[in-house]
Image: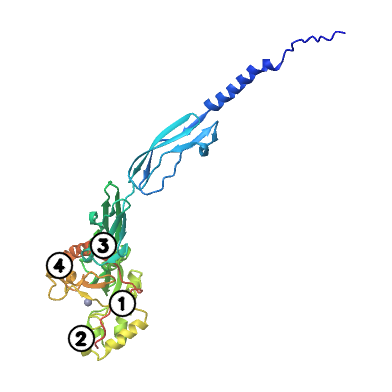
Amino acid sequence: MNSKRHRRPVKRKTANALPFFIIAVAILLAIFVIGQVDIHVGNIRVNYGEPFVDDAKVTWFGFDVTNWADVKGEVDTNKLGVYSMHYSFMLYNMSRTVTVVDLKEPVISLYGDEKITLATMDSYQELGAEAWDNYDGNVTENMTISIDQITPNYAQVIYEVSDSHENIASAIREVEISPGTVYLTFDDGPSGLTASYLDVLKEYGVNATFFVLGFSEIKESWKAGIINRAVEEGNEIGMHGYSHVYSDIYKSKETALANFDTEKNLLKMTVGIEPQVVRFPGGSSNTVSRSVCEGVMTEATKAVVDAGYNYIDWNVDSNDSGSDVKNSDNIYQNVISAVVPKVGARYVVLMHDGGADHSATLEVLPNIIQTLQEKGFVFDVITYETEPVRHGVNN
Ligand SMILES: [Zn+2]
């Protein structure tokens, strides 16, 4: 018996697989190490005092691995300066600078209303403001205040301030300039000058109210033409009455009312209008009627209102049918000194375009309108709806 065992070396298959394993691991490791790592960072600026939110992003093969990245460095946004931040993932490193800068402008707070209404800009009294900056603190002392009057009716108070890093802030307070409303009224026309009055009104873009008198439908038909033009150009026609003769008008409340009704019929026939606004010859406060009929104004004013008219007096007298009829300077002064800027004010200005030679009124009319426009007054016409200016009855 052959007990001797013959051992034959066995060739191990695994011995041949080892290099392949090593190569495979090496490849995987290489992929792991040199794989596509991207660190997305750039130099940035951060505003002073605001939290620094790190926007760095690290990806590996497109996967977000930011949370596994190693971040070194700190940013104190309460201190201006340049900070370095370092990011690493596996063998990869990136650095960037984060600069804390003051980019924020101061904040201006206005005292009082941001929008105000005044009669004149001259009457503006500075309401004040304060300015605070995130870095410099109170910068009110550096603030400048200027006034820019853009139109006669609108101005801006402008507040400007800069902080120590040239961040500029501005604020505006709006001012509406509202000195009041002017109603220009012309009595006793139309006359040969009325067309020139209309030319002036047109040139300045304003309208007026003409309290016209009666006229001969045949001999003075041109008057109907001028009234028609006045209407077409946006002016209002009121009635002064068919007659201006006190002894005829103020015999009774009936004659006073008839003076307007007759006029209305004339205007209806000649111009095709039926005015509802009237002005008593002499005004509702006249006392000249007393010698004609005691108490007639008390009754006539009621009768006229009952008949559907709105009667209007005036609160500014140009005196152009009084002692200043030939004095254009005085006419100008009489109007301008009485038309005082006041929020909500209403001025009914008595002037004339008939009954006498009113070339002095015509001459100064452009100056009056221009001065009032420069002050921001608004011009309007008187209609039935207009709240009347009335003197009060004295007879
Ligand atoms: Zn008159």
Contact between marks 2 and 4 (CB within 8 A): the answer is: no
Residue 187 visible somewhere in the drawing = no
Mark 1 beta carbon near ligand 1 (under 8 Å): no
Contact between marks 3 and 1 (CB within 8 A): the answer is: no
Q: Which residue is mark 2?
A: 288
Q: Quadrant of residue 180?
A: bottom left
- Nearest to the eye among marks 3 and 2: give it: 3
Q: How far apart are the two marked residues, 1 and 2, measured between alpha carbons?
A: 22 Å
Q: Which residue is mark 4?
A: 360
Instruction: Identify which residue, 319 or 118, lies in the foreground.
Output: 118
Q: How far apart are the two marked residues, 3 and 2, measured between alpha carbons?
A: 56 Å
Secondary structure under tag 4 reads helix
Q: Which residue is mark 3?
A: 128
Label 2 vs 4, first from the N-terminus: 2
Percent from the top left, x then y, of residue 273? 35, 70
**Tag 3: amino acid:** Gly
Label 1 vs 4, first from the N-terminus: 4
**Tag 4: amino acid:** Ala
Residue at 25% from the left image edge and 81% from the top image edge:
391
Name the outermost residue toward the bottom: 294
Secondary structure under tag 2 reads helix
Percent from the top left, x then y, of residue 151? 26, 58
Percent from the top left, x then y, of residue 123? 22, 66
| Crowd class of label 2 (few under 14; some 14 to 19; many from 20; radius 10 Å) | some
Q: How far apart are the two marked residues, 4 and 3, measured between alpha carbons?
A: 47 Å
Q: Which residue is mark 1?
A: 388
- Nearest to the eye among marks 1 and 2: give it: 1
Residue 394 visible somewhere in the drawing = yes
Instruction: Identify which residue, 75 or 138, lies in the foreground.
Output: 75
Label 3 vs 2, first from the N-terminus: 3
Q: How far apart are the two marked residues, 2 and 4, measured between alpha carbons?
A: 27 Å
**Tag 2: amino acid:** Val
